[in-house]
Amino acid sequence: MPLADSLPAQSVLRLRNLTRRFGSTVAVDGIDLDVPPGQVLGIIGRSGAGKSTLLRLINRLVEPTAGTIRFGDTDVTALAGQALRDWRSSAAMIFQQFHLIPRLDVLTNVLIGRLNRRATLPSLLGLFSAAERAMALSVLERFDLAELALQRAGTLSGGQQQRVAICRALLQQPLMLLADEPIASLDPHNARVVMEALRRVNREDGLTVLANLHHLEEARRYCDRVVALQQGRLMFDGPPAELTADRVVAIYGDELDLADGVGLRREADQRETR
């Protein structure tokens, strides 16, 4: 039985002493973290804090220098071969740059999410089954994209492309979604649409969502819990309501205006003058 079919959906993701070094640089430094099933976890921090590396470690796109990743009874750090490929489908990644194939139509881009579920050669020849095509169209319809199914992906807006990327990830039939700065390149309207799509997947499908977010407004609005990294270390873990102005200033420093706008900067400045 494939690993992806044997993993219990209601498992806790457990990170213990998770560490990644690149030469003398420690990108992720001894992270201990438990993520219960069905949670939307926002990961925040300055540029270079280790957010992207953390998600890539969980998906095993990057190998840990030390520590363990467990999902239920499965030691993710020990997986190899087909079992590792199955895990990467179960912990589906969504990227800032979408990673669609612009010259292919939307439907085919979504169907690519089935590659790990079937033989490679038929997939490369475009021989997806009628059931898989129906599945892809159903997911596109959920996110108001069905009418764009035969349109080239490269002609879509950024927000539409990111929603197509979410649909592709869902065709992997994952247990969690790992979203690496999914709205960083989008305007405010499309950022809201994409975050609402992720929240909908969480609520309707019960999927755990881990999202790297640079803008705090989205973290507060859409996440059940927020963790903050600073130089690869965990420095905050709690509900969004506990992200006070003082804590945010400590997390972001001179990146505060970029992260949360002048409103919070003004609030922090007022505190200092009282």
Image (tube, grey):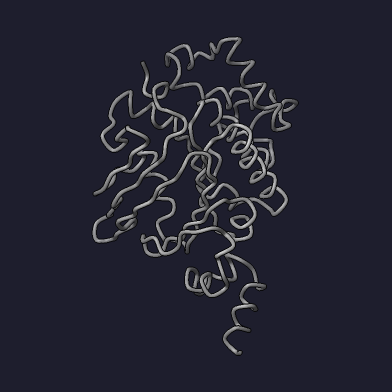
Q: In the image, is residue 219 above or below residue 274? A: above
Tell me where residue 177 appears, x and y as whole percent: 51, 38
Identify the residue at horizontal 34%, vertical 57% (top origin). 27
Judge whether 215 appears above or below 15 on screen: below
Q: Residue at x 59, y 71 (%)?
A: 257
Q: Quadrant of residue 87?
A: top left
Q: Position of residue 56 (x, y in %)?
A: 39, 44
- Work out whether 126 lies above or below 72: above
Depth check: 234 or 182 in front? 234
Q: In which quadrant will I find the C terminus?
A: bottom right
Which quarter of the rendered picture does the N terminus lie within? top left
Outermost residue on the bottom side: it is 273
105 horizontally vs 53: left or right: right
Most foreground residue, 1 or 28: 1
- Which of the pair 169/161 is nearer the observer? 169
Q: Is residue 237 above or below residue 271?
A: above
Q: How many marks?
A: 0
Residue 219 point in image, percent of width and height: 59, 56
Whole-percent x and y of residue 264?
Answer: 63, 72
Residue at image position (56%, 10%) is 129
Left or right side of 18 for 237: right
Residue visible at 44% across and 45% down in the picture: 35
